[in-house]
Image (cartoon, rainbow, N blue to C red):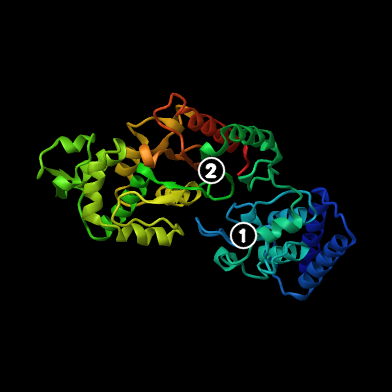
Amino acid sequence: MEVTIVKRIIILFCVLSTLLSSVVFTSAQETTDITEYVSEIESEYESETITKTETTTEKPNKLPAGEFYVGDINNDSYITAADSRLVLKFSSKQILLTERQCVLADANFNKVVNAQDARLILRIAARLDKTKKCSQAESADPALFIAKYDKRKNYTSSLKGFSTSIMDEAVFSQIKALENYCRQLGSVVTFYFIDVNQEYFIQYNSDRVYRTQCTVKAPFVKSMLDYMEKNNISLNKTIYLKSSQKWNGHYLSNFKTGTGFTISELMYYAIRNSDNTAYQMLFDYFGTTNFNENAKKIGSSLRLNSYIFGETSASNMAKHYLDIYNYNGKFKNVFFEHLSNSNTSPLIRNGIPSGVTVMRKSGSGGNATVGYHDCAIVMAEQPFVLIIYTSVNRDMGYDRTPFRKIAEMVYEINETLTY
């Protein structure tokens, strides 16, 4: 009798908690769902043998840190009735869940989030069922959840080539201002913004292909560092300058043929000063295999051959800078320090508050290879990647303005978004 009373208390607590959360169902089907939910829970609790200790004194098990499990909707490392209530409120359109939360809420893996999932999650909380690692839900398509349950609408642009995945109306006016600015720029500028969790993007003609100019140097160095770590190559390894590697107007070309430079020195000049001679020496020593294999791994179509600069778009280059952000090798600190202290024109840096770290690599070309570009990893509270590729003439007086303006607008949008 005592155990039965405890069971009833648990059932009543769940129902009352749901009511107190103001869950109002908007259709007959949803009403049926909640009725079935309460009925099934009561039936299951009546039919299962649950000890008094299990239902009254044991705390929920804490989930392993750094991993995601089905049912932990609020990401507190526990699965409780609170998670079940969030699913009920989402299925009744009372709250919004992120795409990741939708995947974690789909307890029965049928690509629909409703009261049945809330029931399963409550069973997990009561230890009648076991949770599953998020990896088993990775094949689910989060867009299906959003399309079925989310009342939010994507920002609708009127400018050809401009689009975004953002559905937060709080930033629509800011996005509109950015769109209007792009309208003024016309075909001169393209860009791609994406947060490091790849939840949101904004782009303008970001699939237009340009010569990478020197923006490719940072991804090349990243692939080089991966190779060095795997093969135990030291930053103190010396490489000797060849006459064929000298680029006119670049600092290291002033040195005599045969002068030795460590990889550390060459990386410094290639990243901080964008020295083509330094980059050419690294390029010739390490070759393109490591870079091209890494590009394929991250889903980039960019490939390098005998020429040190390839061709790509802003959206494609964003994959490489996301890859740089995720780099955690033993050379990370020195690499990121160089990227954070570029001696080239600030460009995107000018549009970001001074207290925020910006890791970036710019590139420019003249004559037949005209193009002024900047690629940045902005270490805001929610870090993001911003790639701006243009056909702007760097020698004109307005060359930096589009970079600064776009960076300012994107930064403000990113700060307003809810992650």
Which residue lies at the image location 76% right of the left edge and 66% below the top edge? 116
Which residue lies at the image location 76% right of the left edge and 50% below the top edge? 151
Which of the two labelled residues, at mark 1 and mark 2, occupies the earlier sequence position?
Answer: 1
Going by the numbered disc 2, the residue's amino acid type is Phe
Instruction: Name the residue furthest top.
Output: 397
Q: Whole-percent x and y of residue 66?
A: 50, 55
Q: Whole-percent x and y of residue 322?
A: 45, 49
Q: Is residue 88 left or right of residue 208?
A: right
Mark 2: give few (<14), some (14-19) or many (20+) Cα within 10 Å: many
Seen in the picture, residue 49 relative to 26 is either above or below; the reply is below
Q: Nearer the viewer, residue 345 or 416?
A: 345
- Which image quarter is the C terminus in? top right
Seen in the picture, residue 221 relative to 172 is either above or below; the reply is below
Q: Which residue is mark 2?
A: 193
Q: Whole-percent x and y of residue 112?
A: 72, 64
Which residue lies at the image location 51% right of the left edge and 31% below the top edge? 402
Which residue lies at the image location 30% right of the left edge and 36% below the top edge? 272
Q: Which residue is mark 1?
A: 60
Seen in the picture, residue 346 relative to 317 is either above or below; the reply is above
Instruction: Name the residue furthest front.
Output: 368
Asked which secondary structure carries label 2, the reply is: strand
- Which image quarter is the N terminus in? bottom right
Q: CA distance from mark 1 to mark 2?
A: 40 Å
Asked which secondary structure carries label 1, the reply is: loop
Going by the numbered disc 1, the residue's amino acid type is Pro
Figure quadrant of residue 88: bottom right
